[in-house]
Image: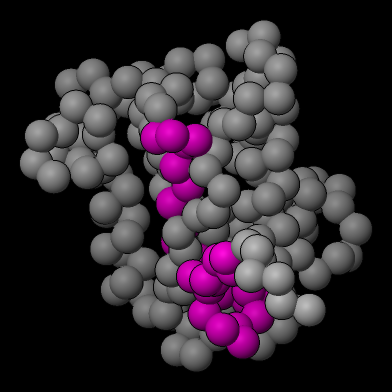
Amino acid sequence: MNTGHELPQRKSIRLQGFDYSLAGAYFVTICTHGKRCLLGSVVGKSVELGPAGEIVQAVWNSLPRRSPRLVLDEFGIMPNHVHAVLGFVGAGLAPPAVSPSKDAVGMATTAPTGAVATARNYSLADVIGAFKSISTIQVNKRLQRKGAPLWQRNYYEHIVRKGEDLRKIQQYILENPLNWALDAENPDCNSA
């Protein structure tokens, strides 16, 4: 029954019909809730992490223990967002134009040692969801907040299809602090 009071449906920004658990590389950007600068500050040409940023870094680095097929690549923390390249190896066919071999994409092809997770086929959404949940709980505990959101509801993702694409993304992440003064995510930036 249509009462005229249905909530609007959010449009998915994901590639419809794509299996985000397939072997291959992915680039993600995750923004803090309200794009607040909680993770650190840009000083000169680098980011100095605050307590929340240190927790976010530690949680990110721990993710392969939860998902044995997960390989972490470049990761950068900015004051109010993070950029990361991550990939899945092993089971599943690779996305079009992406080979799970190091030669084609530039990422390692073996699962991390010391992985303790069971053989579940985690997807990109599973990994990002776990990251956001665990980091939020730990940051709130450290900052003595209760139930405060740390991250925006969604995240940006890009399927990395070629090695050259991967190299450009890695370079972008590395150089991101240098461009903070002009970054649209910078609340002090006047160039919008």
Expressed as whole percent of the image width and height from the top left, the position of residue 81 reads 41, 39
Of all residues shown, which one is farthest toward the left?
191
Q: Is residue 185 left or right of residue 79?
A: left
Residue at 54% from the left image edge and 54% from the top image edge:
154
| Res 99 seen here | no
| Res 187 seen here | yes
Expressed as whole percent of the image width and height from the top left, the position of residue 96 reads 50, 90
- Number of callouts: 0
Q: Is residue 10 left or right of residue 2?
A: left
Say above or below: 10 vs 138. below
Expressed as whole percent of the image width and height from the top left, the position of residue 31 reads 45, 42
The magenta stretch spans residue 90: no
Residue at 36% from the left image edge and 74% from the top image edge:
163
Quadrant of the rendered image containing residue 10: bottom right
Q: In the image, which residues are magenta? A: 8-35
Quarter holding the C terminus is top left
Of all residues shown, which one is farthest toward the front?
3
Say above or below: 76 vs 140. below
Residue at 61% from the left image edge and 58% from the top image edge:
71
Residue at 32% from the left image edge and 20% from the top image edge:
41
